[in-house]
Image: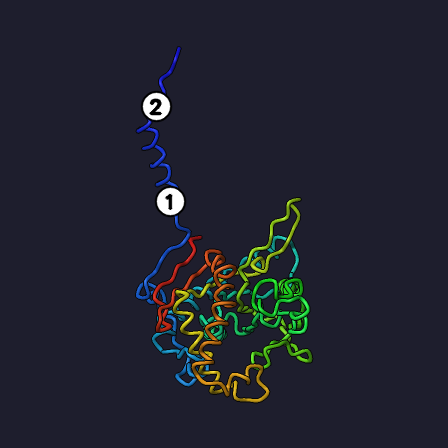
Amino acid sequence: MKTRAAPRKKLKARDDEREESLAFSPYRIFTREEWARLRADTPMTLQPNELEQLSGIIEELSVDEVEQIYLPLSRLLNLYVAAAQKLHSVSSEFLGRKDTKVPFIIGVAGSVAVGKSTTARVLRALLARWPDHPRVDLLTTDGFLYPNAELERRGLMEKKGFPESFDTERLLHFLGDIKSGVASVAAPVYSHFRYDILPSQEVLIEQPDILIIEGLNILQPAEMPKDGGTIPFVSDFIDFSIYIDADPAIIEKWYLTRFMRLRSTAFRDPGAYFHKYAALAPDDVRRIALKLWREINLKNLTENILPTRRRAQLILQKSESHRVESAALRKL
């Protein structure tokens, strides 16, 4: 007995319904006003003079920004840390042993000049004021860049900041020690003034309650092993990740503004790596800065950083005024 095929129109309608049923966003989107209401009764613990110290080179922190964006975020992170501490306690009880408490790691990712450092500094200041986790450390992954001499040897000076310019193996070992509860873990130090690693300096991380890691490529995935083996990602060690987002055209303006401001301040010091630009005419410096942005930083953003945005648990979308206008929080 022959059966008739379903009419083509019905099949297409069924396919359309299936596509609609599969449409799903892993994020819940909040407007600035909706996000601000999530602050609840979280107290404002920063003073006006502290906001000035926490502000970036071109980003001036306002009381409104802290109250409406960062206080709700600190409340959310406090809840995450408390849950992690509770899970650690329950696991230790189940295993019948008392394991060393390990830091809760927060990652802050995004483009050059988007405001990662400012966000990381504000979160550190706010989170350290919660009684459950008073010890909060901050580390930038710039310290894990290869030294300039090594970048020159590898032909990577024009790709400084790209994933391949970092000593990822060293960073993974550092994070592995942190998450293993090692009492004191050393990290290299990078100088933006020198534009290089400082070989005689290091920073020690000694079992903080929270460690904030800020960097360009911390959400970058590794190539998956074909044999089913284990290749760790930096993001494997991160408990909560934040991506600072803005339109690339806006970030370009911020980059140029910051570069020109540094030209008239830090670059004037003869010891600065970019001192050679201090004596040039403003228009010449602007052209150089635009070239650096478009040939290095924008390319890195487009090829490596922006594709990792949706791996973050929270995306903060900024407008040209540096205000966060919306927040996208990954659904549990």
Callout 2: 10 Å neighbours few (<14), some, many (20+)? few
Looking at the picture, does residue 264 appear above or below residue 301? below
**Picture residue at 57% right of the left edge, 72% below the top:** 139
Which is closer to the viewer, label 1 or label 2? 2
Looking at the picture, does residue 31 appear above or below residue 14? below
Quarter in which the N terminus is drawn: top left
Residue 223 is situated, as x and y percent measured from the top left of the image, at: 60, 52
Residue 264 is situated, as x and y percent measured from the top left of the image, at: 47, 87
* Of callouts 1 and 2, the N-terminal one: 2
Residue 227 is situated, as x and y percent measured from the top left of the image, at: 66, 44
Kind of residue at badge 1: Ala
Is disc 1 placed on a helix, strand or loop? loop
Outermost residue toward the top? 1
Residue situated in front as seen by the camera: 310 or 253: 253
Indicate left or right for 217 with 168 as reference. Answer: left
* Numbered label attached to residue 93: none
The residue wearing badge 2 is 6
* Numbered label attached to residue 23: 1
